[in-house]
Image: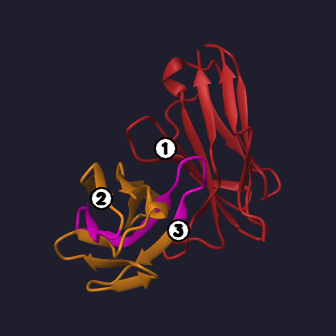
Chain colours: A orange, B red
Amino acid sequence: ILNVEQSPQSLHVQEGDSTNFTCSFPSSNFYALHWYRWETAKSPEALFVMTLNGDEKKKGRISATLNTKEGYSYLYIKGSQPEDSATYLCASLFSGGYNKLIFGAGTRLAVHP
Amino acid sequence: GAGVSQTPSNKVTEKGKYVELRCDPISGHTALYWYRQSLGQGPEFLIYFQGTGAADDSGLPNDRFFAVRPEGSVSTLKIQRTERGDSAVYLCASSPGTRGLYTQYFGPGTRLTVL
């Protein structure tokens, strides 16, 4: 069974704080990792697709890193704003299931003014 | 351009009834996916279409669930004899091609409640 785990489950930070959370996945047969941001009552929004060990991606104040050898990815948010409040989901793809995203349960972030 | 749309946004039904959930993918996207998210969990894969055919339906929980995409665009997820455990948010996504390097673009979901 392929398990993708995210931690922490939820996080409360103050506006202006920087924060990060973790996605862990089995390193064997890894193919790609996707990060999504999901605000309540909206569609999940794609943030990054990452494949290579050591990959780093950045989008505004949000960045992500990937370590495929040890099976983890970090998502960083610099200078959190209230509009960053959302659930952040990671999902892995593995060889043999190239189109089947295996999601973690998400990290729910609340940024307080 | 228009994103993925799903209708209805909310559906309340009684145990034992039949429901249909519709997904309109982004125009030109050949791949279409269905996932469902139960409370406290991440989305769980159900089925994936490449064109009109179901390329992988390994996530459908049992034979009460069926999905079609007859013209390679709009898809309908059909659930027969609904059970309370079917209550979840059903998400649809589309992508311009296959294989994992393509972003899957999600719709807002249909929240199904089975009473």
Pinpoint the chain carrying mark 3. A
Residue at image point 52% right, 54% down: A39
Are the residues flagged by discs 2 and 1 from a single subunit?
no
Q: Horizontal and vertical percent for residue A81?
A: 43, 67
Which residue is disc 1 drawn over?
B59
Mark 3, residues whose alpha carbon is within 10 Å: few (<14), some, or many (≥20)? Answer: some
CA gap between label 2 and label 3 equals: 23 Å
Frontmost residue, B51 versus B38? B38
Which residue is disc 2 drawn over?
A13
Question: What amino acid does circle 1 point to?
Answer: Gly
Question: What amino acid does circle 3 point to?
Answer: Ala
Which residue is disc 3 drawn over?
A46
Q: Horizontal and vertical percent for residue B109?
A: 62, 45
Mark 1, residues whose alpha carbon is within 10 Å: few (<14), some, or many (≥20)? Answer: some
Magenta range? A16-45
Q: Horizontal and vertical percent for residue A54?
A: 26, 86
- Front: mark 2 or 3: 2
CA gap between label 1 and label 3 equals: 22 Å
Frontmost residue, B24 versus A84? A84
Are the residues flagged by discs 2 and 3 from a single subunit?
yes
Question: What amino acid does circle 2 point to?
Answer: Val
Residue at image point 61% right, 35% down: B111
- Front: mark 1 or 3: 3
Q: Is residue A43 magenta?
A: yes
Q: In the picture, residue A35 is in which quadrant?
A: bottom left
